[in-house]
Image (cartoon, helix red, strand yellow):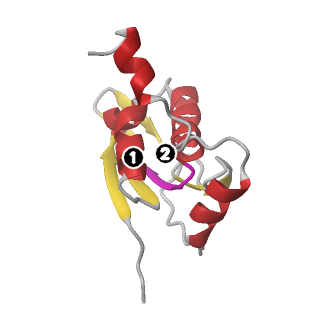
C-alpha cells in the first residue's frame, strides 16, 4: 500500500511560497503544516494555507495550536485543504481531531485538468535574466 509523499513545514515556512514549491517539484502530494498562528492573524493563516495548496496543486494538512499561552491566543482552525484550495474539513477554535479520507490521485488529476499549470509554467530563466533574484 502506497502511503504517499508527504512533506513537513512549520508556521513561518508557510508564509513564503518557495518551500512548498520545492516540495511540490520534488514529488510531494501533501504538506503537513505544524502552526502556531495567533490572534489577530487568522486572515493571513486562511489565505496562505489555501494559496500554498492551490499554487502547488497538492493537499495541505494544517495543524494550528489552540488556546491561551502566556500572552498569546492561538486560534486553532486546523484544516485539510484540497489541491483546488478548498477546505475538505476545518476545525473551529477548539481542540478537535480531524479524520478525512483523501485520494492522493486527485493531486495528479488536478494538475492535469486545471488550465493553469502552476508547476509547469514557471519561467525560471525570467528571474535570472531580469535580475529580480540573485
- In the picture, the quarter occupied by the N terminus is bottom left
Q: Which mark is residue 65?
A: 1
Circle 1/circle 2 CB separation < 8 Å: yes
SS for tag 2?
Answer: loop
- In the picture, the quarter occupied by the C terminus is top left
Q: Is residue 41 above or below residue 92?
A: above
User: Range of the magenta residues?
Assistant: 57-65
Indicate the position of residue 115 as horizontal and vertical percent values. Answer: 73, 45
**To which residue does mark 2 refer?**
76
CA gap, disc 1 to disc 2? 5 Å
| Residue 74 in magenta stretch | no
13 relative position to 101: left or right: left
Residue at 59% over, 75% down: 101
Indicate the position of residue 19 as horizontal and vertical percent values. Answer: 34, 39
Indicate the position of residue 78 as horizontal and vertical percent values. Answer: 51, 51
Considering only order in the chain, which callout, 2 or 1, is on the residue closer to the N terminus? 1
Amino acid at each position: 500500500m502506497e502511503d504517499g509523499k508527504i512533506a513537513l513545514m512549520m508556521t513561518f515556512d508557510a508564509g513564503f511560497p518557495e518551500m512548498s514549491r520545492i516540495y511540490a517539484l520534488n514529488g510531494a502530494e501533501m504538506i503537513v503544516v505544524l502552526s502556531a498562528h495567533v490572534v489577530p492573524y487568522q486572515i493571513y493563516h486562511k489565505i496562505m494555507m489555501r494559496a500554498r495548496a492551490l499554487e502547488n496543486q497538492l493537499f495541505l494538512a494544517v495543524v494550528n495550536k489552540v488556546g491561551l499561552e502566556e500572552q498569546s491566543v492561538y486560534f486553532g482552525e486546523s484544516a485539510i485543504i484540497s489541491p483546488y484550495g478548498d477546505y475538505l474539513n476545518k476545525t473551529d477554535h477548539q481542540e478537535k481531531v480531524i479524520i478525512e479520507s483523501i485520494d492522493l490521485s486527485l493531486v495528479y488529476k488536478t494538475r492535469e485538468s486545471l488550465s493553469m499549470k502552476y508547476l509547469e509554467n514557471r519561467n525560471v530563466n525570467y528571474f535570472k535574466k531580469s535580475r529580480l533574484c540573485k
